[in-house]
Image: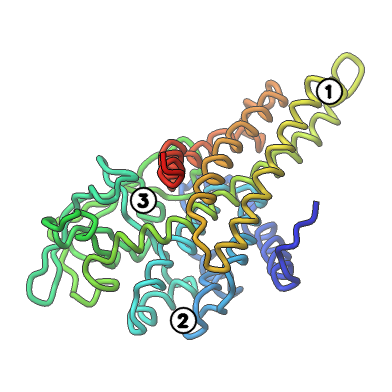
Amino acid sequence: MKYDIFSSEHEQFRDQLRKFFADKVAPHWEEWDAKREIPRSIWKEMGKMGFLGFCYDPAYGGSGADALFRVVMAEELARCGVPGFGVAVAGHNDMGTAYINLLGSDEQKKRWLTPCTTGDAVCAIAVTEPGVGSDVAAISARAEKKGDSYVINGQKTFITNGYYGDLMVVAVKTDPKAEPPFKGISLIIVEKGTPGFTASKLEKIGAHSSDTAELFFEDVTVPKENLLGEEGSGFYAIMQNFQLERLVIAALSVETSKLVLERSLEYTKERSAFGKPISKFQVIRHKLVDMAMEIELNRALVYQCAKAYTRGEDVTREISMVKASSGEMVNRVVYQATQLYGGYGYMSEYEVARLYTDVRAVSIAGGTTEIMKEIIGRLMGI
């Protein structure tokens, strides 16, 4: 089914991305997974191609593209079959840098957003703490203002791009006595190499090429100019950008599911048992049909949300729905695909086996399925 959503410019962008990822990314997944990192050179190449920060103002290296270009990027990141790379790019493009663009002054954008757009710097957003996930208002990391500086103390965890990243957009309490507590949350930039700031790698079960880190701040002193926006504006910015983050995750989930379905169709047509392709068995056909139906239903809602979001509409409820739905769906689709592949589905050399662990985090990161349901329920008035 064709959807009336993307223009010829969007499709041209898609073609460029697909060719680039097929040539520069897909052949290297094994090496990147083994090293647990993405080479800095690929960020530079993406910057030269205009694949980073394309939605931002041309004054800071972007092209002023609309949000639908983000959906195209998410879909092509999924299609290249290297989820760790996709997570890293989305963490930089749609999460970390988004806060600099949203709250930053012209001077701050020139200083930090421009190098992120050219690929000379990699950005991360640091909100989650060991004891705090979706309850952002409960963070304990603090930034005390002393003269013309902020002194930061605290800890963050599960931070995408946190180890190799150059810029951390850190959520901190600048007013621990604020009531309600969320009014005391601010966002401050901490640059790699700042004294007292250290990062430790975390080992995941999947998406290995994406670095995930635990961050430590011990009397980290940064100038007051590193504050993004006004004190107390951080929580509002985080809540606002959650919708973009979750929309991108949903698009990644749907396209990954489509990729897995395509691989499964190919395999079940080639694999024979009892004298015929296993796709000819009713139980197998029905599994494949169930996968296809779920994918199309979720795709339709992703696209509706994307169009509404691009128009500036508040689609918090619908985006929460499709984030929850698509995150659970991609896990079901990959599980069924692994079953269809039989013993080969358990072999790490096969793409579906790798994706089995790679996609598990989708229903956790960016807000768990359970949290999405709580948000939806609240917006339903229940």
Q: Which residue is at the far left?
A: 147
Q: How many residues crowd around disc 2 within 10 Å: few (fewer than 14), some, or many (20 or more)?
A: many
* Residue under label 3: 159
Instruction: Left or right? Give the position of 41 relative to 143.
Output: right
Query: Which of pointers 1 and 3 lies earlier in the amino acid sequence?
Result: 3
* Residue under label 2: 60
Q: Which mark is residue 278?
A: 1
Q: SS for tag 3?
A: strand
Distance CA(mark 2)–CA(mark 3): 25 Å
Q: Which residue is at the far front?
A: 381
Q: SS for tag 2?
A: helix
State the residue at coordinates (41%, 52%): 160
Instruction: Left or right? Give the position of 220 relative to 255.
Output: left
Which x, y percent locates residue 91? 46, 57
Query: Which of pointers 2 and 3 lies earlier in the amino acid sequence?
Result: 2
Quarter of the figure with residue 183: bottom left
Q: Quadrant of the C terminus?
A: top left
Amino acid residing under circle 2: Tyr
Relative to 217, is 138 above or below? above
